[in-house]
Amino acid sequence: MPEMHEMAPLEVVKIADGAYRIEDNGVRCLLFVGTKLAVLVDTGFGQSGSLKAVVESITDKPVILVISHADGDHIGNNAEFGPAHMHPAEMAHYCHTASHILNTNPNAQIAPLWEGNVIDIGGRVLEVILIPGHTPGSIALLDRENRFIITGDSIASAVFMFGDFRDFHSYIYSMEKLAAMKDVFDEIYPAHGPFPLPADMVDKALVAAKKYLAGELKPIDPPMEIPAKMYEHDGAGFFAV
């Protein structure tokens, strides 16, 4: 995580009409504006100024806050918004991160979001899909009409899979689940790294995870100082022990 004095300002990049990515020093938030409401996915580090001010410069619609998962770089600006909607399996992780890492009070700031729920903002519908592994309550959000899926940290060129709350067996289950749905999306919207990713990154992540558990991937030194090694296969990889 970058030091506070190194933090660059938030950067807004328009994806399409009513769709924006807000880049925050290596992590991104996603904003979708419908005819009735807006939905904000994640809130970044919380060290680069007011995310709410940025959102309000784009839309005056009421904003629903959705959390893909509760790692600290995804919930830093939550206090600027209303209740954080997340899968109940993520709530313990959220409360721990908010109180012990961000030193904020998470009480009365949580609302449940179940698998199969749909978020209809008017002209755009996002469907909630539970994809545990990176964290117990990680979710994806599927836009069937526009054929993309938002996956938080669960799909990237290198997924953090060390430390508390990570589980490779659950991760493999989740990638199998997404691989079986590939006919309904063409692009993946990840929270880190290149954007967007092609749909076949699901297959690559699944193969790499299976190879990791089978002991078939060689550990290499990561590009940053973390208590883990990097494991890679065919463009997909993990930071793990």
Image (cartoon, grey):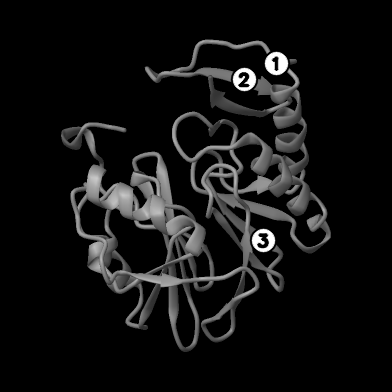
Q: Secondary structure at mark 1?
A: loop
Of pointers 3 and 2, the one earlier in the residue sequence:
3
User: Badge 2 local density, few (<14 within 10 Å), some, or many (20+)?
Assistant: many
Residue ID at (40%, 50%): 93
> With respect to residue 76, does 172 lie above or below?
above
Q: Is residue 129 left or right of residue 228?
A: right
Report, in whole angstroms, how far the alpha carbon at label 3 lies from the one at label 1. 30 Å
Q: Are marks 3 and 1 in contact (CB under 8 Å)?
A: no
Q: Which mark is residue 174?
A: none
What amino acid is found at the position of numbered circle 2 in the picture?
Tyr
Corner quadrant of residue 202: top right
Report, in whole angstroms, how far the alpha carbon at label 1 lies from the one at label 2. 6 Å
Residue beneath disc 3: 148
Q: Quadrant of the N terminus?
A: top left
> With respect to residue 1, does 87 lie above or below?
below
Residue beneath disc 1: 217
Of pointers 3 and 1, the one earlier in the residue sequence:
3
Q: Secondary structure at mark 2?
A: strand
Residue beneath disc 2: 231
Q: Position of residue 17 (x, y in %)?
A: 53, 72
Q: Are marks 3 and 2 in contact (CB under 8 Å)?
A: no
| Residue depth check, mark 3 versus mark 1: number of the one nearer the observer | 1
